[in-house]
């Protein structure tokens, strides 16, 4: 039983290694000539793959194909483990730099009281400070749907004046089937 588990684990490790090895190294490189660069950035020029492999073996490092689409393809002489570590680190930094902003929604009605408007504006201010977009809906029911558009915009302005964070209106107030909607973003 333990022999079976060991072989399954080795199989899983082999699959994981193959997934990580997206980049051809050493004898997996099949192009005749390469532009070779060392780990320190020294350019060795355009040389044959065999000569590059012997240079990498002489230094005790690996030959890694960095840019296969370039003419001629670019390879780097460096430790493969260090290369994987650097690539993983670059991926984490790039992932950390991406900012995910959500669309948050605040809904008010024509007769919403001042205190309720202050609470909703405070929440909208927090969301804008976090970098999220905010959708402010002036929800209209019954006859209020047919009121003067300027009056409705004035009612929408009541909550917009209470928002403390600087914002810009990314989309002007739009009249929809349920009311008036405006989208806000942080400046």
Image (cartoon, helix red, strand yellow):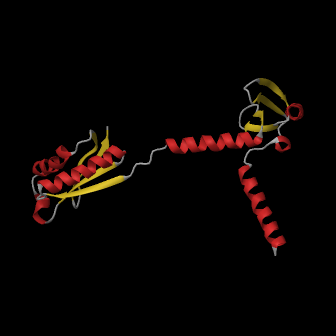
Residue 28 x, y percent position in the rendering: 83, 45
Q: Quadrant of the C terminus?
A: top left
Which residue is more in the foreground, 35 or 112?
112
Left or right? Give the position of 144 relative to 55.
Answer: left
Which residue is more in the foreground, 185 or 48?
185
Left or right? Give the position of 169 relative to 81.
Answer: left
Residue 7 x, y percent position in the rendering: 82, 67
In this picture, is 172 found above or below 110? above
Left or right? Give the position of 101 relative to 65.
Answer: left
Which residue is more in the foreground, 20 or 169?
20
Q: Residue 11 falls in which quadrant of the image?
A: bottom right
Q: Residue 180 falls in which quadrant of the image?
A: bottom left
Q: Is residue 182 visible?
A: no
In this picture, is 168 found above or below 132? above
Residue 34 x, y percent position in the rendering: 80, 32
Q: Quadrant of the N terminus?
A: bottom right
Residue 89 x, y percent position in the rendering: 62, 42
Q: Residue at x 13, y 58 (%)?
A: 112
Q: Residue at x 26, y 41 (%)?
A: 165
Q: Is residue 105 visible?
A: yes
């Amino acid at each position: 039983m333990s022999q079976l588990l060991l072989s399954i684990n080795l199989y899983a490790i082999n699959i994981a290694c193959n997934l990580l090895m997206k980049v051809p190294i050493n004898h997996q490189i099949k192009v005749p000539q390469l532009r070779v660069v060392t780990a320190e950035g020294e350019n060795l020029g355009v040389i044959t793959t065999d000569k590059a492999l012997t240079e990498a073996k002489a230094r005790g490092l690996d030959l890694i194909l960095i840019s296969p689409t370039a003419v001629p393809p670019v390879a780097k002489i460096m430790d493969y483990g260090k290369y994987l570590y650097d690539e993983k680190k670059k991926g984490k930094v790039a992932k950390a730099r991406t900012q995910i902003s959500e669309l948050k929604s605040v809904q008010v009605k024509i007769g919403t009281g001042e205190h309720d408007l202050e609470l909703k504006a405070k929440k909208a201010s927090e969301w804008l400070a976090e970098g999220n977009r905010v959708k402010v809906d002036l929800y209209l029911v019954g006859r209020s749907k047919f009121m003067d558009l300027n009056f409705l915009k004035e009612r929408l302005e009541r909550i917009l004046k209470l928002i403390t964070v600087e914002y810009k209106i990314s989309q002007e107030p739009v009249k929809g089937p349920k009311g008036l909607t405006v989208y806000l973003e942080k400046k």
